[in-house]
Amino acid sequence: MQMATVYRRLLKAVYKHVGKDGGKGHFRDFVSQEFRKNSALSDQEAARQKVKLASDYTYLINSVHHHQDLLFSYNIAVDRSDEMTKILNKSAASVGLRLPDAYQP
């Protein structure tokens, strides 16, 4: 892969998933600083390894956030105690009962 393409993809992933707030700008600054520092490497193998590492980091950032989105979509990572309380209240109401306010499942 070309260095500019990997650089753009990594900055885009950091901007999208890590954030663009003022307090998180040091991530983008670090990426930019590392690419500038390693842009003049004379060893082609070392340069290729650095570009591959940046590409792998981009893939990792995107994959972690995609995994997190999947967890939320399947309600695995969501606290469901409020939802269960609503379901229990509806079930009790359907048979003419009402759960006490102090009910703790």
Image: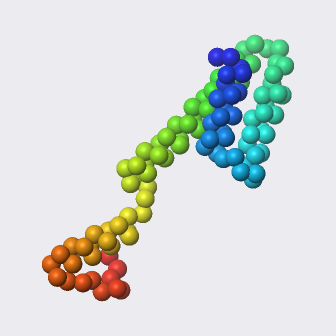
In the rendered view, does 79 fall on the left or right side of 11? left
- Give the x, y percent position of residue 70: 43, 45
Q: Residue at x 43, y 55 (%)?
A: 77
* Residue occupying image coordinates x 66% and y 39%: 14
- Compared to residue 65, the image places residue 75 above or below, namely below
Quarter of the image for the N terminus: give it: top right
Placement of 3 over or under 84, stated as above or below: above
Quarter of image, res 17: top right
Quarter location, residue 41: top right
Image quarter for residue 43? top right
Residue 48 rendering spot, x and y as whole percentages: 70, 17
Q: Residue at x 64, y 45 (%)?
A: 18
How many numbered circles does the render carry?
Answer: 0
Give the image's coloring scheme. Answer: rainbow
Residue 85 spot, x, y in % from top left? 33, 73
- Quarter of the image with the C terminus is bottom left
The residue that appears at 32% across and 71% down in the rendered structure is 86
Could you tell me if residue 105 is visible in this image? yes
Q: Position of residue 68 (x, y in %)?
A: 49, 47
Pick the front one: 65 or 41: 65
- Can you say whether 18 is above or below 63 in the image? below
- Left or right? Give the position of 92 relative to 26: left
Task: Answer whether residue 46 is visible to the viewer in this image.
Answer: no
In the figure, 98 relative to 52: above or below? below
Q: Is residue 64 left or right of residue 58?
A: left
